[in-house]
Image (cartoon, rainbow, N blue to C red):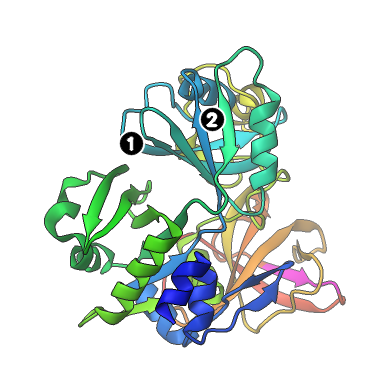
């Protein structure tokens, strides 16, 4: 079984050969649950969960002008990004709306750009659109890499199983090429604005299969689980992590999505800069990404619009799930500033005309 999976060179096939069944979702097959939704969510909250995010857009950029060019067309400061450093930025339209977020890895002689699966074609076209005289080339690496994500409070200790104390040599938001258990991979340590830590593993598909196989068979005392889409969706809702295409799309801007930590306000012009700066200067931000909770499960049939007690439009629900930790049905929503205070009571109408009561909550959710 193991040798055949390596020949297929695809983690997806490897999981199927282990007996896991993907489900059709948004035109593609995804592993929504591996063994148990409850166990997977518990690993994310208390142990360590492993996600396969290899379907992300992974692009290789080469040329002497790459960092300067990305610096000029996206929101964050990139031109002085050092070798082996990683940072995140946002591509925005001329109107300051979000195209997608992207993570940049600087290998010095080239860079990798990792974005969402939903908008990978759009991101590539956007980057190519503005290349005129710049020495920048972008190519899709489809099939060349696998990308794994380790989340949870035990993630760092768990990675020591594979690479030992070498993990202590990797500073926050840096990466290092590692040989662990005879397997070559790049280990990336990412720490966000709230101090939440996660690890990415970037390697060949063949080596990703060997790594996952090793982790499954050597998890020892760790609360380790493969994590499917359902458990991760609930985890990110509770954490207040926006995702493409639900929260990150061209209907919203970085202010609304709570992503101003990815916007450098001192670097000068970039595409969409004037609009984004003006929104802040003149206090024109009309809505914010908030948590929302429900007393009952709600249907995802059609757009879920929010209304206040007088029937006025108050926003839109973008993601829903159930939190065992909080013991309630939860979601993310863009809520108008006038009714965005925690504890505000709103009402949701689904595509069938059904109405539900909802309450605005601050992010991240608290138990």
* 50 relative position to 62: left or right: left
Residue 85, numbered circle: 1
Q: Which residues are magenta?
A: 346-351
Rendering coords of residue 289 (x, y %): 59, 53
Q: Main secondary structure of the magenta part?
A: strand
Q: Secondary structure at mark 1?
A: loop
Q: Residue at x 66, y 58 (%)?
A: 246
Q: Quadrant of residue 49?
A: bottom left
Question: Which is nearer the N-term, disc 1 or disc 2?
Answer: 2
In the image, 256 versus 161, the foreground residue is 161
Rendering coords of residue 231 (x, y %): 50, 76
Q: Quadrant of residue 141?
A: top right
Q: Is residue 348 magenta?
A: yes
* 367 relative position to 184: left or right: right
Residue 103 in the image: above or below residue 321: above
* Mark closer to the observer (1, 2): 1
Residue 48 in the image: above or below residue 268: below
Residue 289 in the image: above or below residue 297: above
* 2 relative position to 71: left or right: left
Which residue, as the protein is rendered here, is positioned at the far right? 352
Res 243 seen here: yes
In the image, 331 versus 47, the foreground residue is 47
Q: Quadrant of residue 24?
A: bottom right
Q: Residue at x 30, y 73 (%)?
A: 215
In the image, 280 versus 20, the foreground residue is 20
Res 227 seen here: no
Q: Residue at x 47, y 84 (%)?
A: 18
Q: Is residue 244 magenta?
A: no
Residue 75, numbered circle: 2
Residue 258 in the image: above or below residue 85: below
């Amino acid at each position: 079984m193991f040798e055949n999976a390596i020949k297929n060179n695809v983690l997806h096939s490897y999981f199927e050969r282990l007996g896991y069944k993907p489900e059709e979702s948004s035109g593609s097959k995804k592993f929504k649950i591996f063994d148990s939704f409850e166990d997977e969510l518990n690993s994310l909250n208390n142990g360590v969960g492993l996600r396969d995010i290899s379907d992300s857009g992974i692009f290789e950029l080469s040329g002497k002008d790459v960092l300067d060019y990305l610096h000029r067309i996206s929101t964050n400061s990139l031109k002085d990004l050092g070798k082996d450093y990683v940072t995140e930025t946002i591509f925005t339209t001329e109107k300051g709306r979000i195209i997608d977020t992207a993570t940049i890895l600087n290998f010095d002689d080239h860079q990798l750009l990792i974005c969402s699966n939903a908008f990978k074609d759009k991101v590539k076209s956007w980057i190519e659109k503005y290349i005129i005289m710049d020495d920048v080339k972008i190519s899709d690496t489809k099939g060349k890499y696998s990308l794994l994500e380790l989340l949870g409070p035990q993630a760092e200790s768990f990675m020591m199983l594979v690479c030992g104390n070498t993990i202590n040599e990797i500073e926050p938001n840096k990466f290092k090429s590692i040989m662990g258990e005879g397997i070559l991979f790049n280990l990336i340590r990412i720490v966000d604005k709230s101090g939440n830590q996660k690890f990415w593993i970037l390697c060949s598909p063949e080596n990703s299969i060997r790594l996952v196989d090793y982790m499954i068979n050597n998890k020892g005392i760790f609360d380790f689980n493969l994590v499917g889409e359902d458990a991760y969706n609930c985890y990110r809702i509770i954490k207040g992590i926006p995702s493409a295409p639900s929260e990150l799309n061209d209907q919203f801007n970085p202010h609304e999505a709570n992503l101003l930590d990815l916007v450098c306000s001192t670097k000068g012009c970039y595409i969409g800069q004037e609009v984004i700066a003006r929104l802040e200067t003149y206090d024109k931000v009309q809505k914010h990404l908030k948590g929302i909770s429900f007393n009952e499960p709600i249907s995802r049939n059609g757009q879920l619009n929010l209304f206040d007690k007088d029937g006025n439009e108050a926003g839109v629900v973008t993601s829903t799930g159930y939190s065992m930790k909080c013991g309630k049905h939860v979601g993310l929503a863009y809520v108008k500033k006038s009714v965005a205070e925690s504890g505000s009571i709103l009402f949701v109408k689904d595509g069938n005309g059904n109405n539900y009561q909802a309450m605005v909550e601050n992010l991240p959710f608290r138990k």
